[in-house]
Image (spheres, grey):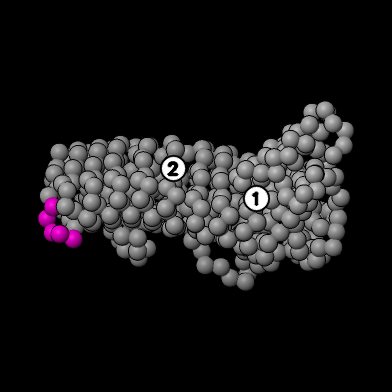
C-alpha cells in the first residue's frame, strides 16, 4: 500500500519509483488535484512493462476535485493501463475526471460516479469493460471516446448534455437501451458505432444533426427520425444495420454529404466507404416521408424505396399501420415525459382531441388495442 500525503496545497503529482509493485494507493485529505501519468513502456526485450502492473485499488478522499485534466491535448494518463485495477472509490465533491484517466483498466468492471461530477474527459474509461454505468445529472461534458468499448447494457444520458460526441459509446457490444434527453441537439461521429445489440433508440425532436457513421453496424430494426433533423451526416450514418426495414422521416430530406466532400476522421475503425445513410441495410427497407416532403428525388435518396404520404389512423403513434400495445406504451411514455413525440405523432396520439397526449389518451389506446372499445 502506498499513502500519498497532502504535499503541495494545489495537488499531488504521482511519481513512485517502485510503483510497479504497488497494489493499493490511498490519498490523504488536503489534496485537491491528482496529476501524473500511468501507461506502459517497451523494455529492451520488446516486452510490455506496465507502470502500475499490480495496482488493484485506489481510494480518493473527500476534497479532491480533479483527477488529471479535461484538456484533450494533455498527455496525462493518471491511471491509464492498470491491468489489475479492480476498485476505485470516488468522493463526493469530485468535479472532473480527466482524459485517459482510467483508459485500458480492463478489470475495472464497476464504478460509482459521484453526483458532484461535471465533466468526463477524452477516453477516460475506454476499454474498462464496465458492466453498468450511472452518469450523474450534473455532468454537462462527456468528451470523445469516454466510454468506448465497455460492457454495460443501458445508459441514460443526463439532461443538460447538448452533444453526444465522437465514439463516446462506440463498440459497446452489449448496449441495448439508450435514453437521450431533449437537451441534445447533435449526435456525433460514430457515437454508437458497432453497438450490435442496440435494436431500438428514440432520437428526440431536439436533435438537428447526426454525424458520419453515427449508428453504423448496430442492430436497429426501425427508426423514427425527428422532424427537425437538418443534417444526416457524411456517408453511412445508419449503414450496415442489416435488419433495418423501416425508417420514418417526418420532414423534408435532411442534408447529406459524400466522403468526397471531405471529412476529418476520428476514432479509428474501418470506413465502409462513400455510401448513403441507409446502405447495406435490409433489402426490405422502406423510408416513409410526409406527402409533400421535398428533396427525396436526388441521390442518395433515389436508391431507396421512398413511401410518400402514408395515412395513419388516429392512435397509430408508431406509424406501423396498426393500433396495438406498442402505441399505448408510447402514449404512456409521452404522458409521463419520458419520450418526446414528433408533431405528427402528437396528432396521432391525441385521441381525445384535447391538444396533448396524456394519460387519458394512453388508456383509450390501450382499450382499443385489447378490443374493449371499437372507436375513439
Quarter of the view holding residue 88 = top left
Residue at the spot x=58%, y=55% of the render? 182
Does label 1 or label 2 sit earlier along the sequence? 2
Residue at the spot x=82%, y=28% of the render? 372
Quick one: quadrant of the C terminus? Answer: top right
Q: Report crowding for label 1: few under 14, some 14 to 19, many 20 or more residues within 10 A (C-alpha).
A: many
Please give the range of residues in magenta.
Answer: 6-10
Q: Relative to 357, say whether 57 is above or below.
A: above
Q: Nearer the viewer, residue 44 or 181?
A: 181
Label 1: element kind: loop
Quarter of the view holding residue 253 = bottom right
Q: Nearer the viewer, residue 61 or 238?
A: 61
Residue picked out by circle 2: 134
Residue picked out by circle 1: 340
For the question of whether residue 271 can be seen, the reply is no
What predominant SS class does the magenta segment belong to?
loop
Label 1 to label 2: alpha-carbon separation: 22 Å
Instruction: Please identify, in this view, whether the residue under mark 1 or under mark 2 is nearer the observer.
Output: 1
Q: Position of residue 55 (x, y in %)?
A: 23, 40
Residue at the spot x=84%, y=53% of the render? 307
Residue at the spot x=72%, y=46% of the render? 357
Amino acid at each position: 500500500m502506498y499513502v500519498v500525503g497532502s504535499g503541495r496545497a494545489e495537488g499531488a503529482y504521482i511519481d513512485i519509483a517502485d510503483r510497479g509493485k504497488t497494489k493499493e494507493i490511498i490519498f490523504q485529505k488536503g489534496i485537491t488535484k491528482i496529476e501524473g501519468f500511468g501507461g506502459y513502456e517497451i523494455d529492451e526485450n520488446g516486452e510490455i512493462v506496465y507502470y502500475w502492473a499490480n495496482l488493484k485499488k485506489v481510494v480518493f478522499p473527500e476534497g479532491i476535485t480533479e483527477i488529471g485534466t479535461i484538456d484533450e491535448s494533455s498527455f496525462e494518463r493518471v491511471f491509464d493501463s492498470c491491468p489489475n485495477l479492480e476498485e476505485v472509490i470516488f468522493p463526493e465533491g469530485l468535479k472532473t475526471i480527466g482524459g485517459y484517466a482510467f483508459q485500458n483498466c480492463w478489470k475495472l468492471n464497476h464504478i460509482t460516479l459521484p453526483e458532484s461530477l461535471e465533466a468526463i474527459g477524452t477516453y477516460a474509461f475506454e476499454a474498462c469493460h464496465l458492466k453498468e454505468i450511472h452518469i450523474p445529472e450534473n455532468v454537462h461534458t462527456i468528451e470523445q471516446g469516454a466510454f468506448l468499448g465497455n460492457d454495460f447494457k443501458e445508459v441514460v444520458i443526463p439532461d443538460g448534455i447538448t452533444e453526444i460526441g465522437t465514439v463516446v459509446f462506440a463498440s459497446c457490444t452489449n448496449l441495448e437501451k439508450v435514453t437521450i434527453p431533449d437537451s441534445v441537439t447533435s449526435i456525433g461521429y460514430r457515437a454508437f458505432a458497432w453497438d450490435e445489440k442496440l435494436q431500438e433508440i428514440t432520437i428526440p425532436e431536439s436533435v438537428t444533426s447526426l454525424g458520419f457513421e453515427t449508428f453504423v453496424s448496430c442492430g436497429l430494426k426501425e427508426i423514427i427520425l425527428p422532424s427537425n433533423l437538418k443534417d444526416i451526416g457524411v456517408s453511412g450514418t445508419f449503414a450496415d444495420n442489416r435488419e433495418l426495414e423501416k425508417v420514418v422521416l417526418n420532414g423534408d430530406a435532411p442534408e447529406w454529404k459524400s466522403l468526397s466532400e471531405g471529412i476529418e476522421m476520428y476514432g479509428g475503425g474501418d470506413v465502409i466507404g462513400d455510401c448513403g445513410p441507409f446502405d447495406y441495410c435490409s433489402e426490405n427497407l422502406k423510408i416513409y416521408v410526409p406527402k409533400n416532403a421535398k428533396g427525396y428525388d436526388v441521390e442518395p435518396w433515389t436508391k431507396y424505396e421512398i413511401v410518400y404520404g402514408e395515412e395513419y389512423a388516429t392512435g397509430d403513434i408508431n406509424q406501423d399501420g396498426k393500433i396495438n400495445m406498442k402505441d399505448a406504451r408510447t402514449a404512456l411514455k409521452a404522458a409521463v415525459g419520458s419520450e418526446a413525440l414528433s408533431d405528427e405523432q402528437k396528432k396521432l396520439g391525441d385521441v381525445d382531441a384535447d391538444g396533448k397526449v396524456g394519460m387519458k389518451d394512453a388508456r383509450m389506446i390501450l382499450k382499443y388495442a385489447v378490443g374493449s372499445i371499437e372507436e375513439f
